[in-house]
Image (cartoon, coloured by chain):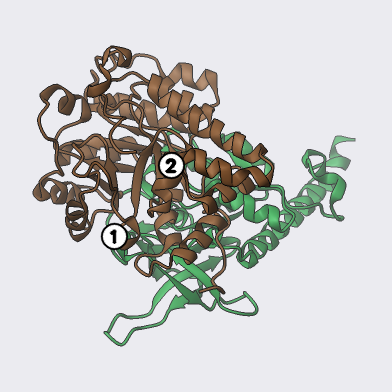
Amino acid sequence: MVSGLNGNAANVGSSGQPRIGVLALQGDFAEHIHMLSLIGVNAVEVRKVQQLSEIDGLIIPGGESTTIVKLLGMFGFVDDLRSHVESGMALWGTCAGMIVIARELADAYPTPLNIIDIGVARNYFGRQVDSFESELEIEGVEGDPMRAVFIRAPIVQNTGNGVEILASIPAKADGTPEQSVAVKSGRVLATSFHPELTEDTRLHSLFVELAEEARTDAIRRDHLHLTEETPSTV
Amino acid sequence: MATTPVSTSNGAGAQRWKEMSKPEVGDWRVKGGLAQMLKGGVIMDVVTPDQAKIAEDAGAVSVMALERVPSDIRRDGGVARMSDPDLISGIIDAVSIPVMAKARIGHFVEAQILEALGVDYCDESEVLTPADIAYHIDKWQYKMPYVCGARNIGEALRRIGEGAAMIRTKGEAGTGDIVHAVTHARQILGDIRKLQQLPTEELMTAARDFQAPYELVVEVHRTGKLPVVNFAAGGIATPADAALLMQIGVEGVFVGSGIFKSDNPAKMADAIVRATTHYNDPDMLAEISRGLGDAMPGIEASKIPEDEQLQTRGW
């Protein structure tokens, strides 16, 4: 039933390839779609709220967080996005995307969507001239550290129950404390940096696994729903 | 350096070009990366902190801090220079989105001052009176990234060769007439398509004809795109103008005089932001274009004598 909606149904296994969308209201969505194509996933650009029902995972890309928050509100995404995540859709915010889905922001503007229980500080490292790259060890990513690109990047200042910290920038000798830059809660992932600006697809693969889980769950739920419903309708 | 992973989105060629020219200040991926984040967005000219706030509230991805918008610069005449640092700092303090500011072509000291002020992107701009008729700024020397205007692929690749991390069409600023932005966007995109088709033995001659760095010509031939982000600027005055340029193939737009010289700036700003997202959806564009009041008063660009055109400044 669900797999019938899947354009890639022909080349997938039993539960079907997860359907991944990248929010394409503003920002570097094309780069995420390119990264997913490198691991064989054919992602779609999401511009309309109805498309959320046709995907198992959504990436909110880098961009300008005030702009993305405003466009999400303007085009009626806010409630539906929340309810899809509540019913199991995987979600990943990179940089601006992390800000958009946070519980609260240090500078109170814009108003984030409160989808993951984290407090975030925007532009934490300063202005563009303070942007940088660094090597980062990430929980759940095997092998060498990832090259992380931080552009006017935010950090996670506090986390609620059930939020796992996957990566931190270590404390510095000048007294700068350790900063959390990648977190996960259920199937919701948030990163301060931009894996889509590198050629390292490991985090994208990790996200595809979360979307696969979401897809398997949805199929099982639909199946249960069908088997429960069927007798009563006969 | 050779082991640094190569950026796909920002152009492997640009990365290699950077490695060849060995600039150690400011990282290419970090500089070009900010421009990637602006894609699908609108960058608005503002002359006060209040206007900057209106632009941010309307969903601008960045603001350009100026003393006068291009149509006023055109009207007033005289020498147009970098804005007062107080004005730029006031705008930086007023908003959380990135702030751009203009330096005169070749005026590398204005650029140094802008970098010291913490400006996020410098526009080495033909809208200001050029300081140097022969040489543009050596943009590799800065941590602050640059955007530069171009009318064709040769001009675009020369600026990228000098270190520009973002290109925009020149158009004809301050006119509200879209015709030159369209011409320049079509020229650049057409030149790219032409380079893509050429057999490799013709690329050196193409580099000579375009007066462009050979390595970048080869890169465009291989990838079919500029190694940096490509926006439109110069004469955009309505949501339909923005959508036109997006459909032609640019990645975002600058709106100069078009917003704060219109009847209702907040509404016009909001509409142009929406139109840049849904540029491919005529039903949406029809809705967005309703009830905006008058766009900025325009000047027909073809009535401007050639020696008064801004686009011929720089080379």
Look at the numbered disc 1 and give the secondary structure of its residue: loop
Q: Residue at x 42, y 52 (%)?
A: B161
Q: Amino acid at mark 2?
A: Ala
Q: Chain of mark 2?
A: B
Q: Chain of mark 1?
A: A
Q: Residue at x 28, y 27 (%)?
A: B173
Q: In x, y percent, where is residue A86?
A: 58, 52
Chain B appears in which tint? brown
Q: Residue at x 46, y 40 (%)?
A: B154
Assess disc 2: are there few (<14), some (14-19) or many (≥20) residues with their C-alpha within 10 Å of its C-alpha. many
> Share a chain, discs 1 and 2?
no
The quarter of the picture where the C terminus of chain A appears is top right
Based on the displayed image, in which of its 4 quarters is residue B231 positioned?
top left
Q: Amino acid at mark 1?
A: Arg
Residue underneath mark 2:
B156
Give the left or right position of residue A185, taking residue B172 as reference: right
Q: In x, y percent, where is residue A11?
A: 85, 50
Please tell me the numbered disc located at residue A127.
1
Chain A appears in which tint? green
Up/down of A161 relative to A137, above or below: above
